[in-house]
Amino acid sequence: MRILLVEDDRETAAYLVKALKEAGHVPDHAADGEEGAFLAETNRYDVMVVDRMLPKKDGLTLVAEARAKGNDTPVLILSALGQVDDRVTGLRAGGDDYLAKPYAFSELLARIEVLARRRKPGEAETLLRVGDLELDRLSHQVRRGGTPIPLQPREFRLLEYLMKHAGQVVTRTMLLENVWDYHFDPQTNVIDVHISRLRSKVDKGFKDTLVHTVRGAGYMIRDSHR
Amino acid sequence: MTAIGKVVRTTAFKLSAIYFIVFTVFAIAFVGWISRETDRVLTQQVRDSIEAEIGILADEGLSKGLTGIVAAIEQRSRVPGASLYVIADKDGHVVAGNVTEVPPALLKQSGLDPVTVPYKRLEGDRTSNVAMVQVLPLPNGLIMLVGRDISEIDRIRTVVAKAMVIGVGLLILLALTSWFFVSRRVLKRIDQVSATSLRIMAGDLSGRLEVTGSGDEFDRLASSLNAMLDRIEDLLSGLKEVSDNIAHDLKTPLTRMRTRVEAALAGEGIGEDYRAALEATIEDADQLIRTFNALLMIARVEAGSPDGALTSLDLARIVADVAEFYEPVAEEAEVYLDLSLEEPLPMVGSRELVSQALGNLVDNAIKYVRSGENPPDTARVRVTARREGPEIVVSVADNGPGIPAAERERVLQRFVRLEKSRSQPGSGLGLSLVEAVTKLHHGAISLSDAGPGLVVTLRFPATG
């Protein structure tokens, strides 16, 4: 997909462009806010990645102006400011997601891909399906191969988030933010423990594993036959 | 600054000068008033007695004629402290009386009002005395003069003037004495205070001001300053400990990273080795970033800028969420996690920060409850939240080895990790953050013995 990267640090930008290309994307790079605004206006992107502090025009202004002009491309804001109120300011300016520096590239990539998917229709699907696993968002029922699987409410939300982004890498931080609405680092591997508990309910006793660990990145639910 | 200038600038000098001026002005005014009043009263008395004398002599003259007056004068002159009497002819020759010499001009004028004149009582008096006299003509062309000596009034005036001089002299002496006393006793102590302060500023933080035990204002000042110094010393030693710990906790992983990368570069490694070295390096970098973030977070919370505005929230809900969040971790560690809640528990705060603080406590409890010699299946962490009057009390208790009473205060400090916990992952910042968050919410944190184990109790002001 086409990605606009607005980042003033040459080295970071060069590395990101290379890594995004390797991941199969088509990135355009702008080194300052004005160039970024120009590219955002003249091209159609799937996702924009905007650094918060930029020369000539800061990232939040760029995003707010693009939004005012009717540009609804999903925006991921990058910032050295990582506190919750900074995040709130960023999201209020029109950003769709916020990532504090320093970040792992796997985290950035996972978030970009989730953001791009967010635009596609099917967001309001009531029945999510991965392989023979079904999740009914209305009745809160989960079945695998027709057998009901009883889940705690939070486990249900965890599975729902994974299935909503089936086939995509979901990082621990994304789960923490979206399933629990926590924006802090719980130090211990709490998310891993939750996932392993979910696995024991969803995958245990079945031939095919659906919940996969993506090394160095996070988790992914996918049907291994496809 | 010259020596005199230095003296003039001292408070003691200024105070003494002010006292001196005020008292001198007052004394002069007072003595002046007294002398004026005395003068007035005495003069009036003299006039009154002159008038009385004239009245008596006039009566004598009416009944017995001139000889009667002369006889009366002779008789009255013999009394001690007698008045002055002169009868002279119109050329000014003294005919009778007890005064030898009066200014001749005086006898020429005759008036009713008494006047003050110099006179000589006896022939050959070297000094002339002063008298108040009244002159009046007699029917046969003679002139009569009646007066009273007023040198006594003069003497009183002299005494008063002398008193004034002595008084002002005494005041100067008093001012000097008070200056001496103030500068010696009081300024000496102030100088001591500044000298001690200078010494402390120069780096000797253990220095303290002298408290004499007299309980005066200087003692009170010294006590408060000493208390301030104690606090500063505490803060500084805390700061030193923190910076030592920062140096240790940040340098260790940095050194490890550097060594690892260096070794990987030097070795004839194959791809796998490089990969392992890089992965471990990223892990170390992540740990450093986490430590750094935690430090920034604590600094931010302590500076009083909470993330997002504080809102009304139900602490019961937050405690339940946190317990639910950590429940699988506890289960995996074979720790019973009990939750006992009173609902609702309304308070004002930041959900994010309170969640993180409680998370740290529960995480710690689960981590350390197993570090004792608990038999299997007995490790227990108990989270309770309830209302106690105006407060919400949240406690996280474990039945692990606990923390010795002497160390409980210390573990709240940044980077402090007790020896036993060094083997566990962690930054030593968890409890510091809990304390900062609690303070931000106007709450209090206390660590106590759960018998056995540790119980950490947070108290927040409740709303509603």
Image (cartoon, rainbow, N blue to C red):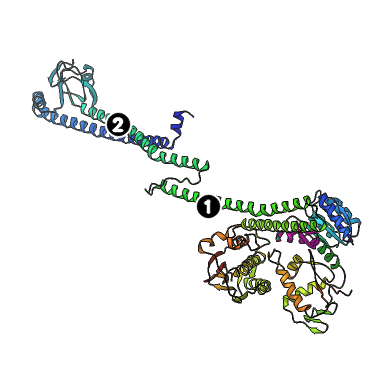
Residue B164's tag is 2
Dot 2: element: helix
**Residue labelled with disc 1:** B234
Nearest to the observer: residue B73 or residue B411: B411
Decide if residue B243 is on the left or right side of residue A6: left
The kind of residue on which mark 2 rests is Met
First-in-chain label (2 vs 1): 2
The kind of residue on which mark 1 rests is Asp
- Name the subunit of mark 2: B
Residue B371's tag is none
Queried whether the magenta region covers residue B447, the answer comes back as: no
On the image, which quarter does residue B159 sit in?
A: top left
Q: Quadrant of the C terminus of chain B?
A: bottom right
Query: Where's residue A215, x and y in %?
Result: 79, 65
Label 2 vs label 1: CA separation?
61 Å
Q: Is residue B76 above or below residue A2?
A: above
Query: Where's residue B325, x and y in %?
Result: 68, 72
